[in-house]
Image (cartoon, rainbow, N blue to C red):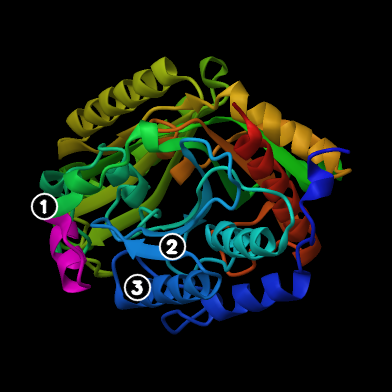
Amino acid sequence: MSRASTVGPVSDTSRLTSDLDTFASITESGAGVTRLAYTSLERRAHAIFAERMQSLGCSVHTDAAGNTIAELAPNADDTRPGAVGTGSHLDSVVQGGRFDGIAGVVAAMETARLATKATAARRRPWRFVAFAAEEGARFGQACNGSRMIAGLTTSEDTRRLHDANGVTMHQAMSDVGLHPDDLATDAWESAQWYGFVELHVEQGSVLEDAGIPIGVVDSISGSTRLRVVLDGTASHTGATPMHRRRDALVTAAACVLAGDRIANDSAHHGTRVTVGQLKVFPGAITTIPGHVEFVVDVRDVDSDRQRATVDQLAAAYRDRASADGTEITVEIMADTSPIVLPASVKDHLAAAASESGLRYRLLSSGASHDAQQVNKIVPTGMIFVPSVDGLSHVPDEHTEASDLASGVNVLIAALYRLDADG
């Protein structure tokens, strides 16, 4: 008898859909889902998660970072040290979808429900985590809750990071009842953990195009984010001759194109450079832009190339500003290295998929995830489920309930395998 066959009940698609609908209803007005980091909406979503996990018999607490952690105690006599866990995040980007992060939390909820109904023994504590502030949409830096438990973002950092309105992360956390000065005391210890698995929607089209239901992630791209500020001279569009202009937007446009050119050259296969945010001041039809700010996201699976690309971009930006007679400041907002996920967990995920009768393929993740930070504390793996048309971070983001249910079945089988190790 395989380990997977002892798990018991299988995932309920109607329950998964209902839970996704519940979380999707907690949003600002407008298209899609907007539930930003360290807001009352994010905390309301965490409260729903906590209530559900308590109803299943889990002990639940919220740490200083705002992560909600539920624990299901072992039910076997021959217990083993170190918890196994799963989870993802509940915040979103502006006008995002209902699956990014949330699918992994809903999967954790369903996994906990299945575990309480299964006859198979649990020898280790099982932990289910809803991470806070994974998206960088508000403060520029991603994976904040998981970075904090890994000791990578400190209380001092929260006073430096701020949103577009100048509100610091420290203030935002305090405003929703969290305690950012206590972050160090809530950092995770490796000895308390054995393995962690995050389920997530792919956010790409590899699985759907191949007709394969399960992705086993072997690596996660790194990301460096730059804030670029350009200053020229604001003046009248009709009265100022072309040769006398110091147009900050012209410089910015050349910088955007330089990034696209660099990322597409033969030395940067696998590099992605994106400018997703650009602000122009004063923003009047008849005024030459005198001040421009934009944010650059550089991603790569190669750490050296990622940092070299950042240096290359910064040099190209400065050269262009010098040629245009504009002033420039380039600041690193956040920097995370790419990682290779450990074979010890990856092999369990592959075996769990096979035991569940599901085809899988290995693939890398171009997006950052909480798993990337958690892996610094505990061996971590990731399961991807298909994204329809590869869409993500948009209202049209969608994953079929049946595909999510398959992912949950692999997830619980993998947790039982990790639980039985040693």
Lower position in the chain sequence, tag 1 or tag 3: 3
Classify residue 178 by image quadrant.
bottom left
- The answer to whether any part of residue 246 appears in the image is no
Farthest residue in the front direction?
77
Q: Is residue 179 magenta?
A: yes
Q: Which residue is mark 3?
A: 43
- The answer to whether any part of residue 29 appears in the image is yes
The answer for how far apart the CA atoms under marks 1 and 3 are is: 20 Å
Identify the residue at image location x=35%, y=41%. Answer: 296
Q: Amino acid at mark 2?
A: Val
Location of residue 120 in the rendering, given as x and y in whole percent from the top left corner: 72, 50
Lower position in the chain sequence, tag 2 or tag 1: 2
Q: Which residue is mark 1?
A: 159
What residue span does the magenta drawing correspond to? 169-181
Which label sits in the foreground, 1 or 3? 3
Count residues near mark 2 (Cα–Cα under 10 Å), then give few for <14, some for 14-19, many for 20+: many
Q: Is residue 422 magenta?
A: no
Q: Give me the disc on residue 75.
A: none
Location of residue 413 in the rendering, given as x and y in whole percent from the top left corner: 72, 45
Relative to 149, say whether 189 is above or below.
Answer: above
Identify the residue at image location x=69%, y=62%. Answer: 114
